[in-house]
Image: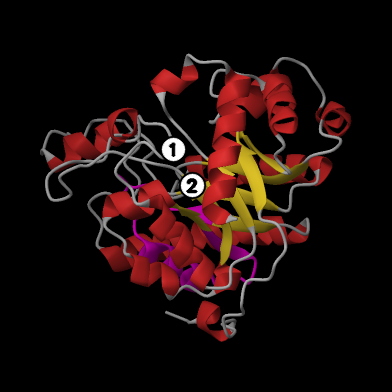
Amino acid sequence: MTTAWHNRTEPHDEVDSMPPKISMNVTTTFHGNVATDIQHAKAAGYAGIELQSPKLYRYLDAGYAVETLPEMLEGIEVTGLGAVLDIERQGSARDEYLAEVRRMCEIAVVVGAPIVQLCTGPVDWNVVKDFRAGHLAAEDGRYRATLGLGEVDAIRLAGSNVRDAADIAAGLGLELYLEPLAWAHLNRCRHALQLIDEAGRDNVGIALDTWHFWTTGDTLDEVRALPKELIKAVHLSDGLDLDRENDVPDQSHHRDVVIGGGAIPLQQWVDAVKSTGYDGWWVSEMFSTRADEQDPQAIASAMRTLIATMVG
């Protein structure tokens, strides 16, 4: 493989005294919609918001034009759009994948987002559970991504799709950030770096999600070794302990906790990221069923205060 990302490595600079840039992923106010998420983020004092496809597409599919969003977003920056899922799709599904990339990139241009998120698959962790248990029959039509392929072949296949997505994004002046999902076949920090190399495009980086990294067993040393220019956003998310040898990470269980209330030593992760010289966006991301039943404005404010304390 090529080593394009190595060629972009720069010396780690000291973090300056500028205030941290804190953005709210809309999972933080999980049951809201585009309008209420934006309102809560503004009221809580976030400088940015990371919009996500389920709510964003729901808004647009209800008949609202994308051109209605900039006025709603006045006073807050859209730090990224997510997410195009199952990026390994092939055949006619690959055409659908690239069409979704283009759709999200075109939305990003209108709302002023500089970057679009791609996630490895399968997004359905139950497929991975069945595969590992030997229960995924050949005739099972559920999407299985690169399950069953060797790592080299999996990287080559997915990397080709990342390359084509990067070309679409570049044509619109945008970047991409990769998020390897913890239960996916391609789920590690090293896989993200290999995909960047395989794609061979300068507009591809990483969404460093603390839950996915910690859950798979990626280390703080791996984080410290990352070139800071490859880290395009840091998703601060907590999680619960698991048996990494035997458990398939299940987001509905292993991620069901308030940020700061789980097993991840988040301050250590923040400090490791900061040691790279990273000075980009810190993003709250949370999948807590208990928090989801509280006042979303109070939750948004509490999470911003917590993140500001950790990263400030």
Q: Give the amino acid at mark 1.
A: Ile
The location of residue 225, given as percent across then percent down, is 43, 76
User: Is residue 213 covered in magenta?
Assistant: no
Q: Say if residue 21 shows up in the picture.
A: yes
Q: Based on the displayed image, in which of its 4 quarters is residue 156 positioned? A: bottom left
Q: Residue at x 57, y 80 (%)?
A: 12
Instruction: Classify the position of the N terminus by image quarter.
Output: bottom left
Q: Say if residue 185 shows up in the picture.
A: no
**Nearer to us in this view, 105 or 271:** 271
Q: Badge 2: few (under 14), some or many (20 or more) residues near its Cα, within 10 Å?
A: many
The location of residue 249, given as percent across then percent down, is 26, 40
**Nearer to us in this view, 190 or 105:** 190
Q: Secondary structure at mark 2?
A: strand
Residue 236 badge: 2
Say if mark 1 contacts mark 2, CB within 8 Å.
yes
The location of residue 222, given as percent across then percent down, is 37, 70
Q: Residue at x 44, y 37 (%)?
A: 259
Q: Give the amino acid at mark 2.
A: Leu
Asked if 302 appears above or below 271 in the picture, the reply is above
Q: Based on the displayed image, in which of its 4 quarters is residue 76 positioned? A: top right
Label 1 or label 2, whichever comes before in sequence order: 2
Instruction: Classify the position of the C terminus by image quarter.
Output: bottom right
Q: Which residues are magenta?
A: 178-206
The location of residue 194, given as percent across then percent down, is 41, 70
Q: Which residue is mark 1?
A: 259
263 sits to left or right of 193: left
Q: Badge 1: few (under 14), some or many (20 or more) residues near its Cα, within 10 Å?
A: many
**Nearer to us in this view, 70 or 150:** 70
Asked if 175 appears above or below 120 in the picture, the reply is below
114 sits to left or right of 186: right
Q: Secondary structure at mark 1?
A: loop
Residue 27 badge: none
